[in-house]
């Protein structure tokens, strides 16, 4: 029987090896660190997990595809972007995970997202493997016609790697209903198949699921509510700072309001808005979803209760809850100190890895309830799996049915993480609970399926 400290030494060696084998991929190193650092208790307790090669296989993607995406802008100029799809782990089901279109995308970013997705998807219990993809294409300021041409070129390569039983992409930053539509159209044209289950996040009239757009934000609020219940509180009357102003942020704000809490901020890369009366969702949706504008327009049109702060940190705004819903590493150590000083009770991650490791450590040490993204934001991919189920059965569920399923899934993820943390001697530590519970499911399937 190996001891915990021997196991920790082995895992630390493995992390050094990961850094050597994957140079210049800091986000992937960070994601691997975060998981491997918490696995010592489970690997020490269950000797089968110490089997040589198991964790080495887990940190190596099954397949990585990188391709050229040439496209022409409205003036006829040719642009060349890079496309990625990292098919990380399919022990539990077809690869599943979104596509991100953002200039910051590179292989290391897609690998970090794909790695996180393995554990997140395992936690849903819905039989989906982990993958992620995207491009360094920037859709901001591009016309619909340009976005369409880009999506068509991207799919002209991607189609050969995906399929309802193989790999099922969806949206992420920069990829919403419009992009999924263009991607689905091109897939259908190339393959001559009406294969609904090849992509999720589709429109409602053509295979999409009700509540899929809302699911990540709604799910995160349900997770935050479950963490608060553990502390003997509910969301009624609590104030919340939310970052971002995309799909996740918008539906986080909506669900907070539905449960009696008040979200007073949103943000984008130019700065943030504080609205003392609470964010007016109709106005925010009009600006972001219809006009595809920036958040400063919100402050201009909202009147006296709102102000726009250029630059700066949204985490400077005092509130009971913080729900980072923008992007990775957006909440650092200094931000965590400010939040703690301002009496924050819970931080729940709507984005993927938005809190730096140092900040997570500080928040946990200060007794703040912390919900890691791979548990807290799993509602989006969970409803994607429900979309796949509806597609397979050639049926469409009511919004009420999808919402009930989502709520049950989030409750179950919360209790799984909570109970697992307790079982492994880390009560209240949802990071450890999520990592170990996700790991157990994937590792058991990998061991059962042999060395592949
Ligand atoms: N991009 C989302 C995530 O980070 C959703 C992925 C999906 O629906 O496949 O989980």
Image (cartoon, rainbow, N blue to C red):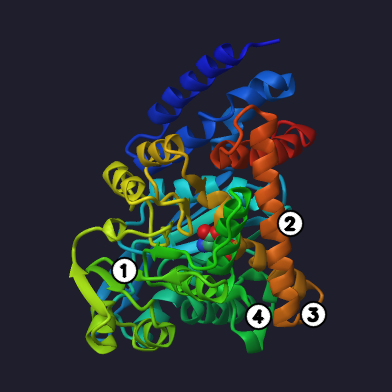
Kindly identify which residue carries mark 2.
Answer: 126
Neighbor class of circle 2 (other Cα within 10 Å; few <14, some 14-19, many 20+) is some
Whether label 1 touches label 3, CB < 8 Å = no
Whether label 1 touches label 4, CB < 8 Å = no
Q: Label 1 to label 4, Cα distance in Å?
A: 26 Å
* Residue drawn at the location 65% of the way across and 43% of the way down: 417
The numbered dot on residue 394 is 3
Q: Label 2 to label 3, Cα distance in Å?
A: 18 Å
Q: Nearer the viewer, mark 3 or mark 4?
A: 4
Position of 286 relative to 438 (above/below) = below
Q: Tell me which label, 1 or 3, sits earlier in the chain.
A: 1
Q: Label 1 to label 2, Cα distance in Å?
A: 33 Å
Percent from the top left, x then y, of residue 114? 52, 50
Kindly identify which residue carries mark 1.
Answer: 267
Residue 324 makes an appearance in the image: yes
Neighbor class of circle 1 (other Cα within 10 Å; few <14, some 14-19, many 20+) is many
Position of 62 relative to 233 (above/below) = above
Report the quarter where the C terminus lies: top right
Q: Left or right: where does residue 344 sit relative to residue 430?
A: left
Whether label 2 touches label 4, CB < 8 Å = no
Q: Left or right: where does residue 305 sit relative to residue 396?
A: left
Q: Quadrant of ligand 1?
A: bottom right
The numbered dot on residue 210 is 4
Q: Label 1 to label 3, Cα distance in Å?
A: 39 Å
* Residue drawn at the location 76% of the way across and 74% of the way down: 390
């Amino acid at each position: 029987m190996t001891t915990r400290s021997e196991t920790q030494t082995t895992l630390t060696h493995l992390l050094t090896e990961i850094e050597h084998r994957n140079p210049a991929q800091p986000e992937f190193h960070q994601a691997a660190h975060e998981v491997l650092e918490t696995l010592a208790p489970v690997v020490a307790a269950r000797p089968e997990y110490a089997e040589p090669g198991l964790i080495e296989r887990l940190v190596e993607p099954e397949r990585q595809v990188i391709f050229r995406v040439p496209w022409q802008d409205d003036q006829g100029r040719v642009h060349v972007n890079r496309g990625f799809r990292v098919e990380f782990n399919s022990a539990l089901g077809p690869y599943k995970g979104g596509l991100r279109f953002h200039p910051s995308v590179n292989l290391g970013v897609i690998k970090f997202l794909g790695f996180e997705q393995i554990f997140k998807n395992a936690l849903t219990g819905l039989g989906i493997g982990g993958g992620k993809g995207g491009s360094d294409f920037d859709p901001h300021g591009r016309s619909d016609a340009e976005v369409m041409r880009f999506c068509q070129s991207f799919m002209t390569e991607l189609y050969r790697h995906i399929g309802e039983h193989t790999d099922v992409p969806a949206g992420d930053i920069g990829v919403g209903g419009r992009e999924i539509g263009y991607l689905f159209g091109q897939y259908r044209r190339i393959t001559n198949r009406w294969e609904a289950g090849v992509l999720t996040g589709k429109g409602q009239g053509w295979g999409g699921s009700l509540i899929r757009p809302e699911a990540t934000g709604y799910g995160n609020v349900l997770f935050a509510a479950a963490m608060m219940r553990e502390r003997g509180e509910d969301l009624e009357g609590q104030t919340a700072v939310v970052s971002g102003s995309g799909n996740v942020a918008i539906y986080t704000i909506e669900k907070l309001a539905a449960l009696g809490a008040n979200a007073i901020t949103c943000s984008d890369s130019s700065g943030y808005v504080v609205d003392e009366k609470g964010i007016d969702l109709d106005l925010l949706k009009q600006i972001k979803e219809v006009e595809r504008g920036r958040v400063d327009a919100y402050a201009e049109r909202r009147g006296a209760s709102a102000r726009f702060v250029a630059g700066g940190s949204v985490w400077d705004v005092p509130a009971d809850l913080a729900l980072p819903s923008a992007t990775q590493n957006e909440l650092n150590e200094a931000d965590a100190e400010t939040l703690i000083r301002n009496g924050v009770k819970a931080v729940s991650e709507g984005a993927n890895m938005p809190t730096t490791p140092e900040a997570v450590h500080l928040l946990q040490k200060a007794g703040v309830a912390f919900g890691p993204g791979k548990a807290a934001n799993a509602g989006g991919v969970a409803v994607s799996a429900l979309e796949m189920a509806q597609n397979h059965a050639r049926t469409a569920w009511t919004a009420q049915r999808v919402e009930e399923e989502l709520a049950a899934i989030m409750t179950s993820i919360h209790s799984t993480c909570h109970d697992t943390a307790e079982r492994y001697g880390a009560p209240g530590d949802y990071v450890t609970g999520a990592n170990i519970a996700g790991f157990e499911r994937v590792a058991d399937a990998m061991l059962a399926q042999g060395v592949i």
